[in-house]
Image (tube, rainbow, N blue to C red):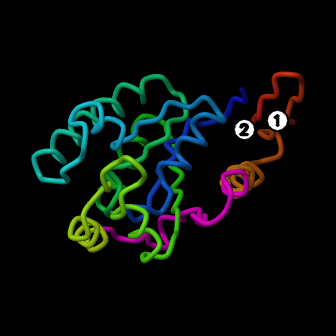
């Protein structure tokens, strides 16, 4: 298993409309680098079985996820967050908290055409109920505020392979490292248990 060592820990915030492929990428990134993942969908399934997307449920999920974020910030490890980031206000609140704890934020915007995304979530998979209704999807789509240019999001396509998506995200992390003074750039180590070091 690779590990991601950064000079500053990051909160990698995955954003996009429902059905874009956020959860798949969040799982892939988290598994690849052994990074803790806070997933609203996973917490919801454990608590409620199936999401209703009502206000009471959202409030409970926000409180629980907020608690997990607070606790994981103490570890100074890079964290992956899938959820709680539909609006710019949500993302600013997370970024503010992260910066207070010495974290950097990396916004990863998973883009997929809304028709394809809608098809993924409102149609039932084999032996399963649909993830959300058409009305719930439309409401979530209205609520979602795309990242502003000032948020400097890394944009990946939901149509591409996870490996391609990961390469783009790592490219941003490497670019950030290249902007540091030369004395702070540490060469990558390679061995049987490859560690990706980004300082």
Residue at 54%, 41% (x, y): give it.
27
Is residue 94 toward the left or the right of residue 110 in the image? left
Which numbered disc, 2 or 1, marks the residue that appears first in the sequence?
1
- Judged left or right of residue 64, residue 100 is right
Question: What range is drawn magenta here?
Answer: 144-165
> For residue 130, which quarter of the picture?
bottom left
- 10 Å neighbourhood of mark 2: few (<14), some, or many (≥20)? some
- Please name the residue shown 73% across and 30% down the image: 2
Residue 17 location (% of width, % of height): 40, 65
- Residue 23 in the image: state x and y as whole percent: 47, 48
- Mark 2 in CB contact with mark 1 (< 8 angstroms): yes
Measuring 61% from the left and 64% from the top, which residue is drawn there? 156
What residue did someone put label 2 on? Answer: 199
Relative height, residue 180 to residue 195 (above, below):
below
Determine crowd level at label 1: few under 14, some 14-19, many 20+ residues with C-alpha closer than 10 A. Answer: few
Residue with the most extreme left position: 56
At a point 56% along the width and 35% down the height, the residue shown is 9
Q: Which residue is mark 1?
A: 186
Is 167 contained in the magenta span? no
Secondary element at tag 1: loop
């Amino acid at each position: 298993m690779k590990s991601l060592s950064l000079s500053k820990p990051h909160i990698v915030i995955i954003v996009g409309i429902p059905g874009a492929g956020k959860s798949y990428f969040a799982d892939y990134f988290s598994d690849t680098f052994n990074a803790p993942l806070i997933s609203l969908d996973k917490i919801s399934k454990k608590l409620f079985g199936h999401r209703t997307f009502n206000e009471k449920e959202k409030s409970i999920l926000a409180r629980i996820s907020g608690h997990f974020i607070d606790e994981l910030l103490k570890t100074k490890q890079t964290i992956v967050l899938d959820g709680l980031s539909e609006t710019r206000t949500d993302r600013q609140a997370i970024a503010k908290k992260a910066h207070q704890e010495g974290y950097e934020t990396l916004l990863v915007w998973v883009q997929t055409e809304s028709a394809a995304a809608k098809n993924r979530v409102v149609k039932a998979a084999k032996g399963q109920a649909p993830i959300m209704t058409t009305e719930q999807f439309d409401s979530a789509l209205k609520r979602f505020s795309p990242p502003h240019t000032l948020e400097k999001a890394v944009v990946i396509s939901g149509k591409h392979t996870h490996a391609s998506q990961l390469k783009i995200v790592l490219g941003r992390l490497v670019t950030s490292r290249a902007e540091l003074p030369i004395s702070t750039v540490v060469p990558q180590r390679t061995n049987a248990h490859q560690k990706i070091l980004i300082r």
